[in-house]
Image: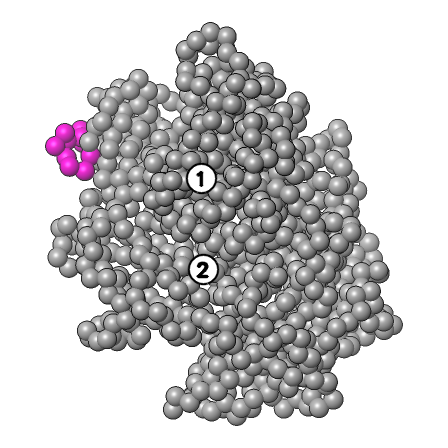
Amino acid sequence: MSGVRRLRPYALRCEHRTTPLGIDEPAPRLSWRLASDLRGDDPVAYRVRVAGCAEDLDNGGQLLWDTGRVADPGAAAVDYAGPVLAGLTRFHWRVSVWSAGSGTPGEADSWFETGFTRADQWRAVWIAQGPRPVDVMDAPTEGEFALDDHGLAPCPLLRRSFTAPAGARGRVHVSARGLYELRLNGERVGDAELAPGWTDYRHRVQYQTYDVTALLREGENVLAATVADGWWSGFVGFEPRRSGAHYGSFPQFLAELRLTGPDGAEAVVATDASWRTATGTIRHADLLMGECHDLRHAAEGWELPGFDDSGWPSAVVTDTGHGSLVASPDEPVRAMAELRPRSVKRHSSGVHVVDFGQNLAGRLRLTVRHLPSGARVVIRHAEVLDGTGQLYTANLRTAAATDVLVGDGREHLVFEPRFTYHGFRYAEISGLAELAEADVVAVVLHSDTPWAGEFDCSDAGLRRLYDCVAWGQRSNFVSVPTDCPQRDERLGWLADAQVFLPTAALNADVAAFFTKWLRDIGDARTPDGGFTNVAPRLVGVADEGAPGWADAGVIVPWHLYRSYDDPRFLARSLDAMCAWVDLVHRHNPDLVWRHRVGPHFADWLAPGTPTPREVVATAYFAHSARLTAEAARVLGRPEPERRYRRLSEEIRRTFAERFVTADGTGDGAAVRIAGDTQTGYLLALAFELLPDGQAAGAARRLAELVESAGPALRTGFLGVALAAPVLDAHGRADLAHALLLREEVPSWRFPLRHGATTIWERWDGWTPDAGFRAPSMNSFNHYALGSIGEWLYRGVAGLDQAPDSTGFRKLRIRPRPGGLRHASARHESVRGTVTVTWERRGGLIALRLTVPPGATAEVHLPTTDPGSVRESGLVPDPGDPHLTRIRVAPDHVLYQVASGSYRFTAAHPPAEGRSGTPGARRPSAPPAPGRRASGSHEEETP
């Protein structure tokens, strides 16, 4: 047993985050994961202690809260239930976990800090440079760049000097209506980008908390902020009647620095009318239009002590209220990686096109040597090139996506925008005679959702597909789950997110990210209880929720509960879920959803015959009613459970009566669903809407439609997410594999053949015959069709959880090899690390898996020869308490295993047919290649 490590907790979280600063949840959820080198080394009890200082956890000192030893074998989290947590305080906590075979618990420690617990604790007020005309920008000086007719203005600078004693500690709480970047004595505070993030500011404005102790100095100090329009007062979306200034007309800033001296004395430095303001280098900054820096306007040293700001006017107090301020519940957007160019090509005098080899969301960092005063460098961005090798920008619509640098004669400088981001693979840089590859870097920006998954297989095309899915997720998780990062839209579309969430939650830990977005969904609700199509909601834009879109308000909380075993996702959403289902029912008493359907996108962008809208809508009506009943069951709410269970069954019967016909009875019946489309059958099968005995006939018809199409899909955003899982569930994993192998339009591989590095919005966004589709709706970085990523994990690799499982407590390991030689997947679940690796060689299949402590797994070993099964080289022992054979089926042997690592082998036929392009096994794509920001989080492993 030497060197063997027993049960131990790791990856401690508070509110699904590592050591968060400034939380305002009164009963934070404290969670941990488990690891052990032994089989069956499962937890039998836990204990959590919370104290005001770390020493009290060790010496039996004063504890704020102690659960005592709690016998709960399945626990991986507990909600704090001690005395009220004081605001602006750090708390330390320890979890102890016992296994049956050891009297000594495994232990781990962590901490969290509270923010403001009451609005009246704030001393800061909202300040700004002052109102500005919304249709006038500062007149550009000679040589300065202006975006005509956009009314963009310079970014305000705000500063305040103060004194601090030696050895002072400090926390600063910061927000903006708009975007901010804060510096203390010239050093940047934190590493958050595009902070404080996008919310509906009428309901919530987030603030962040930073520890600035290391930046303080004895004597004079300076807090200095730059603010920009951002989502608050900049351009957002594509509504021509309200293209910008949705929430306000100019940016505002709020900050409160709390200092504690070595003697315990406290002082506060807060935004008020004593702050001074001016403008500087950044002449405009907009998320869609881009950013312009004119170095001739630089106020050198303005963020440092000793600067004379006597000529600067005082800031204007714009608001003294704090009721909408909330602590950020998720990690911010960060600079997560840097990419070097794949190539730099000179197109004409002073014009270079840079290819980074990867479509991404972010910005450039450009090193420039000697830029004469007034000379301009212009950077334009695009996802693809046209047929002449020039940037293709028509699909950006009104988004200029242009960054500009105006020189002041200095010999060496580095230009990097700070308040914008773009979706691009290519950048055109004009104004430089020479450009070396070392002079330009792409900085990747996205919300810091710790990467938690890996997928690999023997087919290079599938590996590329997985990487495209992963990069699409990174590019579009920017404060909210957007549809695309490049054009004048970038909205939090609910349907895109709900179909992609199963994939997203396997790729990354998105619990905190979606905690925040669920609040956005709640804020966006209409007065009659309806969910909308996008969240956050834009002011002045009507948004009546459509089927499949608004239903995300029900589907997303349910899937988050299943992924993270946190019933608070349901508890916080149940009332809104009920209100939504009631609203649809009220407008459609005959249970066919025809009325109050909003824009009714149906199965958006599906090629071929459209699925009848009433089929799509009524299927989602039934699904939302059933999930609402399930949520009520989980929460112990019997009355709503009964009510919505009854309603879902009534809608199910109505669906069958109105839309389903059957010729014959039993499994042999020929079943037809109105419209006879792939998506119609997928919805009916996935949502279990068919009468008993008709699922088999519907599945046969679905398979016929897929086969006759190519085999190919004729589905859009809603149908594509269901295709592979439904085919697999009804015995046609072979068809799911065939779809993955297809290379013609429509398919996932067609874009790969033509250089795609992210998922396209359309199956045929570009073809050799037709060229580009209409630029009005043609993104090349759109994750919705990437929902196939879920089946790469669950189907191809076989890493799944049972239908009645939450938080991967009951694993289902069931590989579907198809024509592949090997595949593997890893997922860092809320209970610990789950891994699956299988390989076929020499008439055998080898299956290796890891089950985290506290979990079990049913293992479907694909073999027709039960006698050939070996585990760790031996015939499985019938008396082994960790390994039990449950049954023998024609195509597999089912085992139930306890936690631990296992190595199975069994007879298995060699791969038949096409297995894709071979390639060396490799780890799947990391969160992004290159250097990661120091403040970013990666999932911990034991």
The foreground one among 732 and 249 is 249
| Residue located at (27% from left, 30% from top) | 905
- The question of residue 905 being in magenta is answered with no
Query: Which circle's residue, 1 or 2, is located before the other in the chain?
Result: 1
Closer to the eye: label 1 or 2: 1
Q: Is residue 462 above or below residue 568?
A: above
* Numbered badge on residue 617: none
Amino acid under disc 2: His
Residue 758 visible in rendering: no
- Write down the residue under mark 1: 628
- The question of residue 881 being in magenta is answered with yes
Contact check, label 1 and label 2, Cβ < 8 Å: no
Where in the figure is residue 249, as x and y percent of width and height? 73, 66
Where in the figure is residue 831, as x and y percent of width and height? 32, 49
Specify the color scheme.
one colour
- Res. 882 image quadrant: top left
The foreground one among 796 and 163 is 163
| Residue located at (45% from left, 91% from top) | 166
Write the start and end of the magenta stretch as one range: 874-883
CA gap between label 1 and label 2 equals 34 Å
- Write down the residue under mark 2: 937
